[in-house]
Structure formats: structure tokens, C-alpha cells
Image (tube, rainbow, N blue to C red):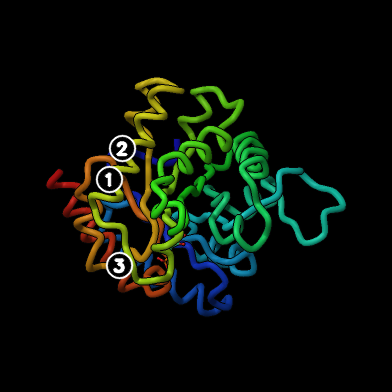
């Protein structure tokens, strides 16, 4: 297993930001910061173009690397796509699947998410499956129904032993890049539901050790109160992960929250 429930899991999704030199500079700083913050698990998720160099720069570092997407076939005539074995080949451990931006702009569905999760697991990558509701769905009282269908369809056909190897990230769409964060209570309510759904479908054992991340405008100012919540095990950070200082600060607050839980 590449991850543990014992530490807060802090992943930085860089989205479509950073050239290769910028990425390498950032992870060198982050590596140094991480050495004083061993009680957190750091993961960086750069764009494809920087993955190889970032992975090389982090060899021997506790900071791990993930990709932002992948295709489910191993190889073939799929112009523009990247496969799980290719990601493994360059040192990726994780892969983000079904981010709301991919669902919104690139036509991803629960079915494609399910295909990708299965392929990632078959090739030894840890999927970080993203789920979350839109503002309209929240206002109409459909948050739980939405999240439930994303979990059930995204994890369709997977045995408990496979589900155990997946990380789930709850990212309410209305909180992404908007500066609006779900309150700790709002986030905890959905995280609790996710864990209870995992327990019901895949057993208590899977549910109790599942890592469930929160994402959506996580910053140093709110990471402590979010991570204090019982069912929040870490954060998937966008904007605030682009600078080593703010990313490390988020981890510092998360460690404090975890120690006090
Ligand atoms: P922000 O932290 O910029 O809101 O992005 C969250 C996100 O989408 C992480 O995957």
C-alpha cells in the first residue's frame, strides 16, 4: 500500500500550470519543506509535460507523484491519450480520475471514470476518484443523491479489496477556484455519507481505512478546521498548491488538526 490513514494526505493538483523549469523548482522547495513535515503525506500532480522531470527530481524524496488523467487502454491508436503503464513507467503512483473539470469540459462520465479506475488499478496506480455536486444540485437538495450515484457508478464491478486501494476526493464544484469553501460541517456531512456508503457496499473494514479528501478552495487559513473533521483525511488542493510555501503551510495545519482529532 502506498498510502496510510495515519497521516493527513495532502495532494496538489496543478491543473494546466507550470513549465518544466517552474515545476522542478517548485518540487525542490517542496522536498525541503517536506523533510520537516514527515507527519503528512505529500503528493504533487503536475501537468503531463512536467511529470517525468518532476518524478526524477523527487527520486528518494517522501513527496510522491500523480497524474491528472489517463486513458483506460494500454496502448494503441488513441491520439492525444496517455495510458496507465506509461504513467507507471515515469514514476507515477497516483492518478486523478473524473475531476469535475474533465467531466464538465471533456465529456467524462461515470462510465469512463469506472473504466479508468479499473485500468489504473490493474496497472498498480492508485486512483484518486473525484466526485461532487454543482451549486444547482446543492440548492435543490440533491447533493447526496449526486454523490451517491457517482460513487456507485464509478466503483461499479469492483471488489472490496480493490475499493480499498482507491482514494476518494469530494470536491463540490461550486467551491473549486471560487474562493467559496464548504464549511467544515457541510464537508463533514458529505464525507460521513461517503464513508457510510462504502461501509454499506464494501464493508466496515474498507470504510474505516478509506482516505477521503476534501477539495475546493483549500488554503492555509481553512485547512485546520476542515482537517479537524472526523471523516476528512486530507485535501486535494488546486490554486494554493502552486507555491511550495502555501502548500507546506496547508500540510502543517493539517498535521496539527490530525494530532488533535
Ligand atoms: P482550488 O483549490 O483552486 O479551488 O481547486 C480545487 C481542485 O479542483 C483540486 O482538484
Res 12 quadrant in image: bottom left
Instruction: Kindly tell me whether mark 3's CB lies below 8 Å from ligand 1.
Output: yes
Where is 76 relative to 45, above or below? above
Quadrant placement of the C terminus: top left
Residue neighbourhood size for the residue with mark 1, other residues' Cα within 10 Å, grouped as few (<14), some (14–19), many (≥20): many
Q: Badge 3 local density, few (<14 within 10 Å), some, or many (20+)?
A: many
What label sits on residue 188 in the rendered view? 1
Q: Quadrant of residue 139?
A: bottom left
In the rendered structure, the answer to whether residue 202 lies left or right of residue 21 reads left
Mark 2, ligand 1, within 8 Å: the answer is no
- What's the distance in space between the residues labelled 3 and 2, CA to CA? 22 Å
> In front of the other: label 3 or label 1?
1
Q: Quadrant of ligand 1?
A: bottom left
Residue name at image x 49 percent, y 23 percent: 160
Q: Which residue is located at x 36 percent, y 66 percent?
A: 217
For the N terminus, the image quarter is top left
- Identify the mark nearer the N-term, 3 or 1: 1
The residue carrying mark 2 is 192
Number of other residues with Cα within 10 Å of mark 2, as a class: few under 14, some 14 to 19, many 20 or more:
some
**SS of the residue under disc 2:** helix
> Disc 3 designates what residue?
219
In space, the residues marked 2 and 1 are separated at their CA atoms by: 6 Å
Locate residue 116, reporting x and y percent: 65, 43
Q: In which quadrant of the rendered view does residue 50 lie?
A: bottom right
> In terms of secondary structure, where does tag 1 sit?
helix
Q: Foreground residue, 260 or 100?
A: 100
- In percent of width and height, residue 92 lies at 56, 52
CB-based contact (under 8 Å), mark 2 and mark 1:
yes
Amino acid at each position: 500500500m502506498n498510502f496510510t490513514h495515519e497521516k493527513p494526505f495532502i495532494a496538489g493538483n496543478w491543473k494546466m500550470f507550470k513549465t518544466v523549469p517552474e515545476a522542478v523548482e517548485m518540487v525542490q522547495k517542496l522536498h525541503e519543506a517536506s523533510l520537516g513535515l514527515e507527519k503528512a503525506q505529500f503528493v504533487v500532480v503536475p501537468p503531463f509535460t512536467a511529470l517525468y522531470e518532476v518524478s526524477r527530481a523527487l527520486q528518494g524524496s517522501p513527496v510522491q507523484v500523480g497524474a491528472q488523467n489517463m486513458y483506460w487502454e494500454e496502448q494503441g491508436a488513441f491520439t492525444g491519450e496517455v495510458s496507465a503503464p506509461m504513467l507507471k513507467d515515469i514514476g507515477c503512483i497516483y492518478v486523478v480520475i473524473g475531476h469535475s473539470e474533465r467531466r464538465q469540459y471533456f465529456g467524462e462520465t461515470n462510465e469512463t471514470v469506472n473504466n479508468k479506475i479499473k485500468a489504473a488499478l490493474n496497472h498498480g496506480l492508485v486512483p484518486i476518484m473525484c466526485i461532487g455536486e454543482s451549486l444547482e444540485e446543492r440548492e435543490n437538495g440533491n447533493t447526496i443523491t449526486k454523490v451517491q450515484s457517482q460513487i456507485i457508478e464509478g466503483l461499479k464491478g469492483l471488489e472490496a479489496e480493490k475499493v480499498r486501494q482507491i482514494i476518494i476526493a469530494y470536491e463540490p464544484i461550486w467551491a473549486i477556484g471560487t474562493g467559496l469553501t464548504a464549511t467544515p460541517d457541510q464537508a463533514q456531512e458529505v464525507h460521513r455519507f461517503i464513508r457510510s456508503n462504502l461501509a454499506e457496499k464494501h464493508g466496515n473494514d474498507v470504510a474505516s481505512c478509506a482516505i477521503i479528501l476534501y477539495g475546493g478552495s483549500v488554503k492555509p487559513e481553512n485547512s485546520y478546521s476542515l482537517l479537524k473533521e472526523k471523516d476528512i483525511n486530507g485535501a486535494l488542493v488546486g490554486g494554493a498548491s502552486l507555491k511550495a510555501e502555501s502548500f507546506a503551510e496547508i500540510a502543517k495545519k493539517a498535521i496539527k488538526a490530525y494530532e488533535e482529532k
